[in-house]
Image: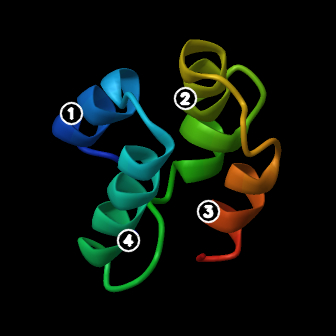
Amino acid sequence: MSKLTEDEIKRLETVASHEEWNAMCLDIKKARDGGYSSDWYEKVIKPGGYLNQFQKRVGDEVGSGITFRTVRDG
């Protein structure tokens, strides 16, 4: 799988809702034939990554469900 593009990183840094987050994750997977980028864990899931930044910015109304849904291809 390819790494996240600059445009995808910009989206990760600015996404403003849980719906946008889910749609963005689907777009990232579509661009890679159904898989996440090779740096997904390192850049997004790892503590301090974009998921953590998003939860701090927007709130964690779904809790850890976002993490599991993105990891489990949901």
- Amino acid type for the residue under numbered disc 2: Tyr
Disc 1 is placed on an element classified as helix
Residue beneath disc 1: 6
Q: Is any part of residue 2 visible from this angle?
A: no
Label 3 vs 4, first from the N-terminus: 4
Q: Quick one: which residue is furthest to the front in this view?
A: 61
The answer for how far apart the CA atoms under marks 1 and 4 are is 15 Å
Residue beneath disc 3: 70
Does 34 sit above or below residue 49? Answer: below
The answer for how far apart the CA atoms under marks 2 and 1 are is 13 Å
Per the rendering, the mark at residue 29 is 4
Disc 3 is placed on an element classified as helix
Q: Quadrant of the N terminus?
A: bottom left
- Amino acid type for the residue under numbered disc 1: Glu
Residue beneath disc 2: 50
Point 40% across, 83% down: residue: 34
Quadrant hosting residue 65: bottom right
